[in-house]
Structures are given as structure tokens and as C-alpha cells.
Image (tube, grey):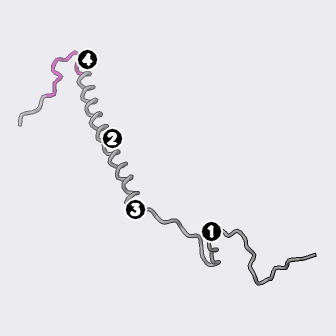
Amino acid sequence: MLKLARPSDQPVMTKSEPNPEPKPEPGDGPKSPPRPQSGDNRRGAVAGLIIAIVILGVGWWLARDLTAASKMQDCLMSGRSNCNVIEPAR
């Protein structure tokens, strides 16, 4: 019986993994992901602020217009005929 012996100084051929990840050193902490640029975060905040200001302005205008129309209707429903606002002469 013939036994093939393998010398111990030759490495065994195994399937190699492509670029295995290096193991972290004991003193190293977990690395944080890279921070995004600050301009991206502010762009959304500024857009939200502009939209909020526009909605507030439209709401203000609508409230004043509806209040004036309500006062006019109240005056007309009371039977008065001089409901127009008279501006004083300057």
C-alpha cells in the first residue's frame, strides 16, 4: 500500500477570500459614518420655513378679507344703507 505524504512546509491550497476585512484593534472604537454636508440639511429647513411663511401670509390675508366681508354682511342684514367704509380726507 502506497501512502502519499504531504510535507508540512507546503501550504494547503484552500479557496481564498477576496480581501478579507482587517480585524479591529482592541483600543479602536466603532467608526462613525461620514457626516453629510451641512448645506443639504439647511436647504430643507429653509424651504420649509419659506413654505410656512407663505401659508401664514395667505392665511392672514384671507382672515382680514373674510372679516371685512362679515362686517359688511352684518351691516347690510341690519337694514342700513350706508355700510361703505368712508375714508377721512387728508
Name the residue located 67 percent from the left edge and 70 percent from the top edge: 16
Q: Give the foreground label among 4 and 3.
A: 3
Crowding at dot 4, Cα within 10 Å, few <14 / some 14-19 / many 20+, comes out as few
Q: Residue at x 62, y 74 (%)?
A: 22
The magenta region covers 75-85
Question: Is 88 positioned to the left or the right of 45 in the image?
Answer: left
Please report contact status of discs 1 and 3: CB closer than 8 Å, yes or no: no
Dot placed on the residue nearer the N-terminal end, 2 or 4: 2
Quarter of the picture containing the C terminus is top left
SS type, badge 4: helix
Q: In this picture, is 80 found above or below 30?
A: above
**Which residue is under mark 1?**
18
Q: Could you give the CA–CA distance between mark 1 and mark 3, rounded to whole angstroms?
A: 36 Å
Give neighbour class at mark 2: few <14, some 14-19, many 20+ (Cα, 10 Å): few
User: Few, some or many C-alpha atoms within 10 Å of disc 3 (few <14, some 14-19, many ≥20)?
Assistant: few
In x, y percent, where is residue 19? Answer: 61, 70
Mark positioned earlier in the residue sequence (4 or 3): 3
Picture layout, residue 52 above or below residue 11: above
